Image (spheres, helix red, strand yellow):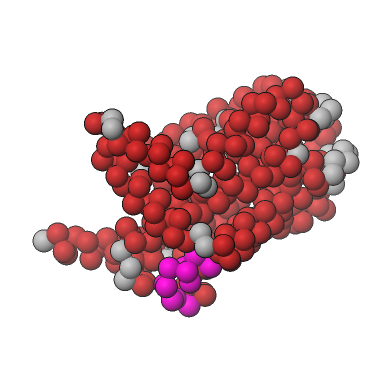
Amino acid sequence: MRKGVTLTIVLSVIAFTSIGMWGDILKAGPALRSFSWYLIPLIAFFGFCNDLVKFFRWHVYLQKMGIRIPAKKSLDIFLAGLSMSATPGKAGLLIKSRMLKGISGHSMISTSPIIAAELYMDLIGLSLISLLGIGLLGNEIWVALLLCMLPLLGLVPGIAGFAIGLLEKIPILSGRAIEMRKALDSMFGLFGVKVLVVSLTITLIAWTSEGVALSLILRGLGFDVGIVTTTVLFGFSTLIGVLSMLPGGLVVTDASLMGLLVHTGIPNTPAAVASIMARVFTLWLAVIIGSIFLVIHRNDVSKDLQGEQHIGK
């Protein structure tokens, strides 16, 4: 975990430094002085609304798995899990399974498919958003199409099973492949038609809220960019970041977002400011709020750890 935190810090510094140099952030003074700061509460609300909306998807998955816990406890676990949003591959989100075990008694193995389903549904949502606005991506349309289609192909059980079957034939990966097959089977068990439609609707609404936040940021900087456009730009850059498997998509998402903003006609410096602000009020706001909830509910994690140590004895 310490290595993951160190990597996240290093990549954060690289991301902000790179964006700052590319956008000549030293010239950002006039843009910031003229920024419509009264929009900040709205930006923060819509930036975090992405995660608030996704809570309902999390709770739907819990109900589908037959895990009955009070909505307040469910929300506490979900929010605490946001503290791990910037861990490599979001593997730290498994802390939700650990906390869930301490409260409901369900093993981490039985609840980890919920985490996988959340992440995969995000990929599906981001892919669909990117496909809907793929015309905005210019000459990179075919690269964009390929990136968007990869996660969608995984929705077909036969294709996903075939890919895992190939991995099982590789000795060094066979153990992981078996675990992936079990998780995949459990995850597809969640995706009944009703649950799929509900969770996909929630996912699309959630990611659209980040597009609203970006649109407000650009408006504050003096640029009128529609919500559809900002949702596609933010969604596609986030998709690239997720596929990179870097913590929080750091560097990749940041650079992609700035590049796409410049591509739409936003000058470098305002694009850099908008990219940094967008990430602060989405990813980092979620991490901060999640960390607060994790500290408040740290006993739910420590009790589970003590239980495992007791069993080990």
Q: Tell me where residue 232 sits by quadrant.
A: top right
Please give the range of residues in magenta.
60-70
Q: Nearer the viewer, residue 51 or 65?
A: 65
The residue at 37%/72% (across/down) is 103
Residue 299 visible (yes or no): no
Q: Is 69 contained in the magenta span?
A: yes
Residue 146 drawn above or below residue 189: above
The residue at 47%/61% (across/down) is 190
User: Quick check: 174 left or right of 226?
Assistant: left
Q: Residue furthest left?
A: 313
User: Quick check: 171 left or right of 87?
Assistant: left
Q: Tell me where residue 16 sits by quadrant.
A: top right
Q: Tell me where residue 279 sits by quadrant.
A: top right
Q: Is 111 contained in the magenta span?
A: no
The residue at 69%/44% (across/down) is 129
The residue at 51%/46% (across/down) is 156
Count of number-bearing discs: 0
Residue 141 drawn above or below residue 37: above
Q: Position of residue 260 (x, y in %)?
A: 73, 30
Q: Nearer the viewer, residue 116 or 53?
A: 116
Q: Position of residue 172 (x, y in %)?
A: 26, 31
Which part of the image, by quadrant, shows the C terminus? bottom left
